[in-house]
Amino acid sequence: MKKDYLRMVDLDLAGSRVMIREDFNVPVEQGRISSDARIRAAVPTIQHAREQGAAVILLSHLGRPSEGEFDHHFSLQPVADRLSDLMGRDVKLVSDWLSGVDVEPGQVVLCENVRFNAGEKSNDLELAKRMARLCDVFVMDAFGTAHRAQASTEGVARYASVACAGPLLDKELESLGRAMQDPQRPLLAIVGGAKVSGKLTVLDALLSKVDQLIIGGGIANTFIAAEGHEVGASLYEPGLIGQARQLLHQARSQGSYIPIPKDVCVAKSFSAEAEARVCDIDQVKHDELILDIGPLTRSEYAEIIWGAGTVIWNGPVGVFEFKHFSAGTRSVAEAVADSDCYSIAGGGDTLAAIDQFGVRDRISYISTGGGAFLEYVEGKQLPAVTVLIARAT
Ligand code: ADP
Ligand code: MG
């Protein structure tokens, strides 16, 4: 991707109202943040703007609330609290912010979840203009949402007086660009997790870029079903079975193959207390859920990972948050860490797993993006970056 956009670090921000689109979409369980990696990553950008004498307004989404209404489950209050701790100063959460934000130079405020505003996801023009009016400089620093053209990512950048890239976004584009230009082969992608439909659509393009593909989590379940196996009550997308079959066929015809788990860990319910049963892939009962890969599959995946020159990893291969179903993701994390390959990992939950298994230091590059990371690797233009380039010329 061309990099002819303005960069925040090159601008004089003194006395300006600087609005930064952050990626504070962190995992929150019962009001507690289980991994604050994304918040920590954002702090240097915010500090830089503040020290330059800017009045700093932060934007982010959190989760997937129904648009147009407040829902305390998706409030950014825990993020404001954590940010205040990390920065050693009060970062106030502003709930009603579209009509105006009170903030002085040197201060930092966080606006409530952008997805509480109707029109955010559809990139409503009027909403984007209202956001743009709140600031002198718009800084896009949320690589994790750069693949979505929404009001707070792309729309606002069209109307703000100045629109530029923050250091985090710039560094991501720089590092990923370098890694993907001429990767050490074989290039292996591991795609797992729960956002099945979103991620299935990127596999198609990914398949033509990589030498090997391992699928895990809810995505694997759709492929397991596509192979004609019972997946019981597992998370999967019945409507995408045809597409999964197509991908399996495409992989075979290009000489690579997508390994389907040979064995799995199943449970009767989706809960941390559920008892785990290990079984062959053709022994899943109709009332069971596949929540992790089994020991045979763990070894097979580890072998593939050890043989790779470059590994791109997004998405856990099991419900690693539950102790009995964490072994698969632990084994993948350890294999990636132990392998001599160049490794790139991204995704909110993937990073949480990497921290949980203590392998962060042994991953070559940690990306803050999940879906955006995959789309970048796929070779797509990221709309929130494209607009910055357009604004700079
Ligand atoms: P990331 O945030 O890294 O992009 P996702 O958000 O797509 O990843 O998915 C992460 C979630 O997927 C985790 O919470 C994990 O528990 C869940 N998951 C993984 N495997 C399964 C499975 N077999 N069934 C249900 N959920 C799963
Ligand atoms: Mg996630």
Image: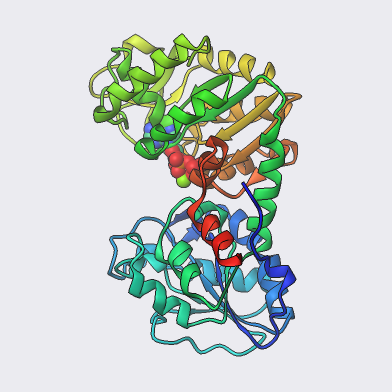
> Closer to the camera, 182 or 316?
182
Colouring convention used in this rendered image of the protein: rainbow
**Residue 76 percent across, percent down from the top left:** 46, 68
- The front one of 18 and 358 is 18
Quadrant position of the C terminus in the picture: bottom right
- 387 relative to 46, above or below: above
Which x, y percent locates residue 382?
51, 50
**Residue 356 appears in the rendering:** yes
The mark tally for this picture is 0
Residue at 64% in and 28% down: 311
Direction front: furthest residue: 393
Q: Is residue 237 above or below residue 374?
A: above
Split into quadrants, the picture shows ligand 1 in the one at: top left
User: Measured from the top left, where is residue 226 in percent x and y?
Assistant: 31, 17
Q: Is residue 231 above or below residue 174?
A: above
Q: Nearer the viewer, residue 126 or 167?
A: 126
Q: Is residue 350 left or right of residue 131?
A: right
Left or right of 228: which side holds 215?
right
Seen at 35% across and 70% down, the residue is 125
- Left/right placement of residue 199 relative to residue 308 reads left
Q: Is residue 33 above or below residue 298?
A: below
Give me the residue at 29% from left, 31% from top: 237
**Residue 327 seen in the current view:** no
In the shown orientation, is residue 135 left or right of residue 40?
Answer: left
Q: Which x, y percent locates residue 133?
A: 46, 82
Snapshot quadrant of residue 18 = bottom right
